[in-house]
Amino acid sequence: MTETISISVASEDLKEFQEKTGMSLNDCIKILINSVKYGGKLEFDTFWSDENMNYLKKAVDDINNDRNLVKFTDEEWEKFVNEQDIH
């Protein structure tokens, strides 16, 4: 059996929510309900915090502008990749 839920949300808030989370409100509610249903806790995922979003934006900007990057020669990169234990 399914239930229909109707809520009113300001269009600006809904747009901001979708931009920040990358998901629809409908999907978010389904995830929330399933989380509680299967014993999860209701808590804020710190990944979406303003502090983390600002950190990620700066990191992307640094990458796009060649700042704070580790540079490898081809030989160094090959050695690094070969030393990784990836199975």
Image (cartoon, rainbow, N blue to C red):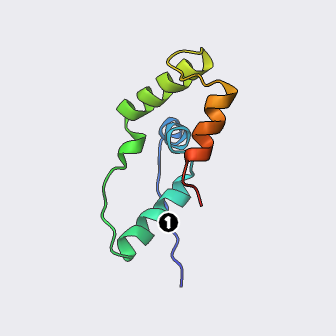
36, 66: nearer the viewer: 66
Assign a secondary structure to mark 1.
helix
Quarter occupied by residue 72: top right
For the image, the number of numbered tags is 1
50, 17: nearer the viewer: 50
**Residue situated furthest bottom in the rendering:** 1
Give the residue displayed 42% in from the left and 41% down from the top. 48
Residue 25 rendering spot, x and y as whole percentages: 52, 53
28, 81: nearer the viewer: 81
Give the residue displayed 55% in from the left and 20% down from the top. 61
Q: Is residue 37 left or right of residue 15?
A: left
Q: Amino acid at mark 1?
A: Lys
| Image: 60 above or below 17 | above
Give the residue displayed 61% in from the left and 30% down from the top. 76
11, 49: nearer the viewer: 49
Say few, some or many: other residues with alpha carbon within 10 Å of mark 1 (under 14 / 14 to 19 / 20 or more). few
Give the residue displayed 61% in from the left and 42% down from the top. 81
Q: Is residue 8 left or right of residue 41?
A: right
Mark 1 sits on what residue? 30
**Residue situated furthest right in the rendering:** 74
| Image: 3 above or below 27 | below
Residue 38 rendering spot, x and y as whole percentages: 38, 76
Residue 43 rendering spot, x and y as whole percentages: 30, 55
Quadrant in which the C terminus is drawn: bottom right
| Image: 7 above or below 10 | below
